[in-house]
């Protein structure tokens, strides 16, 4: 009986520790499309740090033309022959309107990771240009600044 309870407890722990159980299934929102790639933001992956930064994950899914261009940039390295998409992770400083690249990971068409680069703390903060893809992501990921009501003029004393 004790073994049965132990096994059920173990199964429950495994199920509850699954990302699906905690709502961490990717929630890819299409931000932009071009002849190079479709660009997505994973809303479910947003994390706010104790310092108030928002960490976001973005995905570029390559078109055939975009894949060719990416392979040229990657110097036609044979590891990238089946390149399908790239994940980018950014830190956003919502208050300052700046971002810095935190990581890049390239994947093949089967979802296998080809390469990964951890850039946390190694890249400079950059201003997020208005109207850019990151500006659109910032609009989704950053908490809205509460609108303060306009101050009311003092009322005239009653006569």
Image (tube, helix red, strand yellow):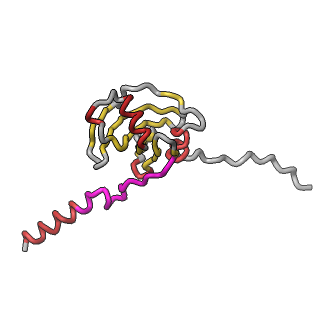
Residue 51: x %, y % from top left: 43, 37
**What secondary structure is the stretch in magenta mostly built from?**
loop
Q: Is residue 84 left or right of residue 28?
A: left
Q: Is residue 150 left or right of residue 108?
A: right
Q: Report the magenta residues as a range.
A: 15-31
Please state, as top left, top right, bottom left or bottom right, where the C terminus lies in the image. bottom right
As drawn, which residue projects farthest toward the bottom? 1
Q: Is residue 89 left or right of residue 136?
A: left
Residue 55: x %, y % from top left: 42, 41
User: Does the magenta run of residues contain 97?
Assistant: no
**Relative to residue 127, is residue 5 depicted above or below?**
below
Number of on-image labels:
0
Q: Residue at x 49, y 46 (%)?
A: 141
Q: Residue at x 81, y 47 (%)?
A: 154
Residue 20: x %, y % from top left: 32, 59
Q: Quadrant of residue 122?
A: top left
Residue 50: x %, y % from top left: 40, 40
Q: Quadrant of residue 19?
A: bottom left
**Relative to residue 51, is residue 29 depicted above or below?**
below
- Could you say which is closer to the camera, residue 59 or residue 16? 59
**Relative to residue 41, is residue 7 depicted above or below?**
below
Q: Is residue 116 visible?
A: yes
User: Does the magenta run of residues contain 22?
Assistant: yes
- Could you say which is closer to the camera, residue 133 or residue 143? 133
Q: Residue at x 26, y 35 (%)?
A: 79
Q: Is residue 118 left or right of residue 135?
A: left
**Relative to residue 105, is residue 76 depicted above or below?**
above
């Amino acid at each position: 009986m004790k073994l049965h309870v132990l096994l059920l407890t173990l199964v429950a722990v495994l199920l509850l520790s699954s990302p699906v159980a905690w709502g961490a299934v990717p929630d890819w929102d299409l931000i932009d499309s071009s002849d190079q790639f479709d660009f997505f933001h994973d809303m479910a992956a947003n994390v706010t740090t104790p310092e108030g930064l928002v960490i976001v994950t973005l995905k570029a899914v390559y078109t055939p033309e975009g894949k060719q261009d990416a392979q040229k940039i990657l110097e036609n390295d044979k590891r990238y022959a089946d390149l399908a998409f790239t994940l980018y992770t950014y830190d956003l400083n919502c208050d300052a309107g700046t971002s810095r690249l935190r990581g890049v990971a390239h994947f093949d068409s089967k979802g296998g990771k080809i390469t990964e680069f951890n850039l946390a703390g190694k890249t400079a903060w950059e201003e997020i240009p208005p109207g850019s893809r990151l500006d659109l992501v910032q609009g989704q990921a950053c908490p809205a600044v509460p609108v303060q009501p306009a101050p009311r003029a003092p009322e005239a004393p009653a006569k």
